[in-house]
Image (spheres, rainbow, N blue to C red):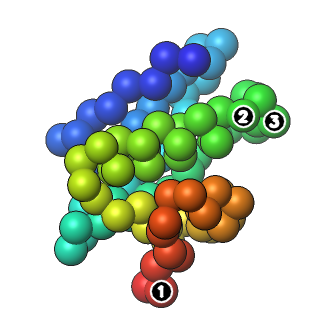
Amino acid sequence: MDITHDSSKGVFETVVEGVRAYVSYRLVDGCLDIEHTIVPPEIGGRGVAAALVKTAYDYALAQGLKPVATCEYAAVWLKRNPQYGADVATE
């Protein structure tokens, strides 16, 4: 899966079978906060969301940013991957 990063828009995205999926984030106080994870039903159930979130949080760690989630999916992902040392945002 080819995932691209557009830092000017705060988006990690991929196209699977012609369908776009993405996570959007914001940078706040040294944190990368995933706000939305969008995977259309046509490509759901294939691990697309997990791959996008992992890529975003790997980027965060490489940049010295703390992974944070206001997105429900990303929050669950962080709970399942405690090695990322992150918390769920309270906003």
Q: Residue 35, percent across and down?
A: 45, 62
Against 6, is 1 above or below?
Answer: above
Tell me where residue 1 sits by quadrant. Answer: top right
| Crowd class of label 2 (few under 14; some 14 to 19; many from 20; radius 10 Å) | few
Residue with the most extreme bottom position: 90
Q: Is residue 85 left or right of residue 39?
A: left
At which x and y percent is residue 39? 64, 40
Q: Earlier in the sequence, mark 2 or mark 1?
A: 2
> What distance separates the C-alpha of mark 2 from that of mark 1?
26 Å
Crowding around mark 3 (Cα neighbors within 10 Å: few <14, some 14 to 19, many 20+) is few
User: Which residue position holds label 2?
Assistant: 47
Residue type indicated by callout 2: Gly
The kind of residue on which mark 1 rests is Thr
Secondary structure at numbered mark 3? loop
- Whether 8 is drawn above or below 88: the answer is above
Residue under label 1, please give it: 90
Q: Which residue is mark 3?
A: 45
Q: Nearer the viewer, residue 16 or 82?
A: 82
Say above or below: 28 vs 17: below
Image mark for residue 39: none
CA distance for labels 2 and 3: 6 Å
Quadrant for the C terminus, please. bottom left
Crowd around label 1: few <14 · some 14–19 · many ≥20 (10 Å): few
Counting residues from the start of the chain, the first of labels 3 and 1 encountered is: 3
Instruction: Evaluate whether residue 74 shows in this view.
Output: no
